[in-house]
Every structure is written in structure tokens, then in C-alpha cells.
Amino acid sequence: MNDFDPKDYQIQVTSFTHSGSGKKMFCARVAELKNVYVEESTVKKAYEQALEEIKVFKEHYLREGLEFPKPISEQRFSGDLRVRLGKDLHKKVALEAAKEGVSLNKYIIEKLKSA
């Protein structure tokens, strides 16, 4: 845990209205740890609780001898991405790429960049 900093993880805080009370609440999730879900009354509390949850999960992983996920910013990416589109969508996207006179790969990259 020498250089471990839970702030390196991607924490997203969103607001929602509690269905029972109608009160505005805040939910924090951690991109790298799908099981971290925190609900609090303020953004600050949700964020801080998410930081604590990251520490708890780290300790649990260590106790269990499991490899703890690295922050996304420290992960390595190859640039290769395999996506299953389904036959109909694959055909539609290929036709659109052909209409624009570009490769399917280039077409998809341009669409993702503009998303």
C-alpha cells in the first residue's frame, strides 16, 4: 500500500430522487470496482465514502490473495477492441461506411470520437 491512493480511481457521483422520501440523494460508483455503490445526502459525503470503500475493498483483496484492480489511468491498452454488433447492425454500419467511402474501422472510430 506504499503508493496506493484511492483518489486515483474513477469515482462518479450522480444525483437521484429517493423513491420513498422524495429527497435528493447522491450515489457514488467506482468504475474499476463494480461492487462499490454508495448513497449519501451530499456529493462530498458520497465521494468520501467511496474513497473509504476503495480502501476496504483493497484490504479485502489483499486478505484473499486477489489482485486488486489498478486505476484506469495506470492500465495498459493495446488499441484493439473487439465488439459484437449483431448481424443487422453490422450490415447497417458497413453500408454507412461504404456510403462515406471509408473503411468500417475508420467509420466507427470517427463516430466514437464525435460521441
Image: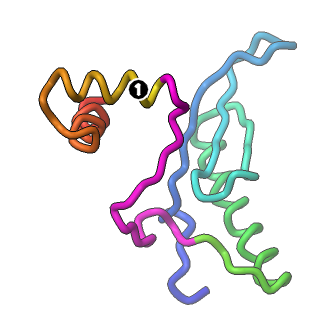
Q: Tell me if residue 110 comes above or below residue 6 in the rendering.
A: above
| Mark 1: few/some/many CA within 10 Å (<14, 14-19, 20+) | few
Q: How is the image coloured?
A: rainbow
Q: Residue furthest top?
A: 22
Amino acid type of the residue tagged 1 in the rendering: Lys
Residue 71: in magenta span: yes
Q: Secondary structure at mark 1?
A: helix
Q: Nearer the viewer, residue 35 or 53?
A: 35
Q: Position of residue 75 (x, y in %)?
A: 45, 70
Region rendered in magenta: 70-88
Query: Which sits in the foreground, 108 or 9?
Result: 108
Tell me: 28 left or right of 23: left
Q: Picture coordinates of residue 71 (x, y %)?
A: 51, 66
Where is the C terminus found, in terms of image quarters? top left
**Residue receiving disc 1:** 91
Residue appearing at x 67%, y 35% in the figure: 27
| Looking at the image, residue 32 lies above or below residue 16 | below
Where is residue 90, by image quadrant?
top left
Predominant secondary structure in magenta?
loop
Residue at 74% in and 15% down: 23
Viewer-nearest residue: 56 or 34: 34
- Relative placement, left or right, of 88 versus 68 is left
The quarter of the rendered structure image containing the N terminus is: bottom right
